């Protein structure tokens, strides 16, 4: 889900308000979600940023900061963590890029040891370098999740049922809160705040302890494959300090 998020850019012609349907009654939560999905795919791209808290084993509570960008075929995500209680522990941080299905990750050694169980020697070798994650890798599905608009739309609304809340104001926009228990890549208690007017695009989504503000809808950014990536197979088989790179 990444840029300035205080303002939601509403694209296209305004549709009917979400507060009511074409009949006399209010729109159901399911219909609100369906219209939000359609609006997201129609916008084509979005930026998001936010923060939240999480608990890491051996560390305790940490603050997670996330910045995202997604479009039809590419995307980026940057995640950093900080701890209010520990100044000596290096916490995981990573930037992930997806360009037409080519996924690359640049992370610190803590990320590689914590997420894929990499040994400290190999993790130190690739820390700060771009690593190419092939589709055949078990790490690919989670690395590629939410990076493109189709994936983001599917993962943001992935629940068996949805519950409509009240109309309120978020980031200066009138929204309807829709709550649900999300499953899949972004699992957990979720509330999505969908704009009442305009194209009915999400303004903010809260998943677990992370709140993301979404904006700059339809404003494309350039995402390119990094030069000099370390290929994943060599990453696991190499014990030498000089890892091969992909030019």
Image (cartoon, rainbow, N blue to C red):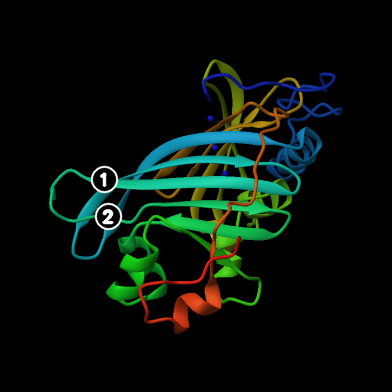
Residue name at image x 42 percent, y 44 percent = 210
Local secondary structure at mark 2:
loop
Q: Is residue 229 visible?
A: yes
**Circle nearer the N terminus (1, 2):** 1
Q: Tell which of 96 and 180 is nearer to you.
A: 96
Q: Position of residue 147 (x, y in %)?
A: 62, 50
Q: Which numbered tag is attached to residue 93?
A: none
Question: Measured along the vertical axis of the image, is residue 90 above or below residue 40?
Answer: below
Local secondary structure at mark 1: strand
Image position of 65 (left or right of 61): right
Is residue 198 shown above or below 145?
Answer: above
Instruction: Give the percent coordinates (x, y) of residue 66.
Output: 44, 42
The residue depicted at 35 percent of the width and 67 percent of the height is 125
Q: Nearer the viewer, residue 209 or 23?
A: 209
Q: Quadrant of the N terminus?
A: top right
The answer to which of 76 and 37 lies nearer the viewer is 76
- The x and y percentages for residue 247 are 61, 60
Q: Are marks 1 and 2 in contact (CB under 8 Å)?
A: yes
Q: Quadrant of residue 30?
A: top right
- Mark 2 residue crowding within 10 angstroms, few (<14) / some (14–19) / many (20+): some
Residue designated by label 2: 91
Number of numbered tags placed on the structure image = 2
Q: Residues within 10 Å of mark 1 (few under 14, many from 20)?
A: some
Instruction: Read off the residue under disc 1.
Output: 82
Residue at image x 44%, y 57%? Answer: 129
Is residue 190 rendered to the left or right of residue 215? left
Q: Residue at horizontal 70%, vertical 27%?
A: 219
**CA distance separating discs 1 and 2:** 7 Å
Q: Is residue 183 visible?
A: no
Residue 244 screen position, x and y as percent: 50, 71
Instruction: Classify residue 157 as left or right of residue 169.
Output: right
Quarter of the image for residue 36 reads top right
């Amino acid at each position: 889900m990444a840029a300035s998020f205080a303002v939601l850019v509403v694209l296209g012609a305004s549709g009917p308000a979400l507060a009511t349907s074409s009949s006399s009654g209010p729109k159901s939560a399911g219909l609100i979600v369906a219209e939000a999905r359609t609006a997201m795919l129609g916008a084509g791209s979005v930026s998001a940023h936010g923060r939240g808290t999480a608990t890491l084993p051996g560390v305790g509570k940490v603050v997670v900061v996330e910045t995202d960008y997604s479009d039809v075929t590419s995307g980026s995500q940057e995640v950093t963590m900080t701890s209010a209680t520990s100044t000596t522990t290096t916490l995981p941080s990573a930037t992930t890029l997806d360009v037409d299905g080519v996924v690359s990750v640049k992370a610190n050694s803590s990320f590689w040891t914590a997420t894929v169980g990499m040994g400290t020697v190999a993790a130190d070798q690739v820390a700060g370098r771009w690593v190419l994650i092939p589709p055949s890798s078990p790490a690919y599905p989670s690395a590629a999740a939410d990076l493109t608009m189709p994936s983001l739309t599917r993962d943001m609304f992935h629940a068996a049922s949805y519950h409509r809340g009240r109309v309120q104001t978020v980031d200066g926009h009138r929204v309807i809160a829709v709550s649900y228990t999300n499953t899949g890549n972004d699992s957990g208690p979720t509330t999505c705040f969908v704009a009442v007017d305009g194209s009915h695009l999400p303004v903010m989504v809260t998943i677990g302890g992370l709140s993301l503000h979404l904006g700059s809808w339809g404003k494309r950014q350039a995402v390119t494959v990094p030069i000099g990536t370390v290929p994943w197979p060599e990453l696991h088989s190499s014990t030498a300090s000089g890892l091969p790179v992909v030019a």
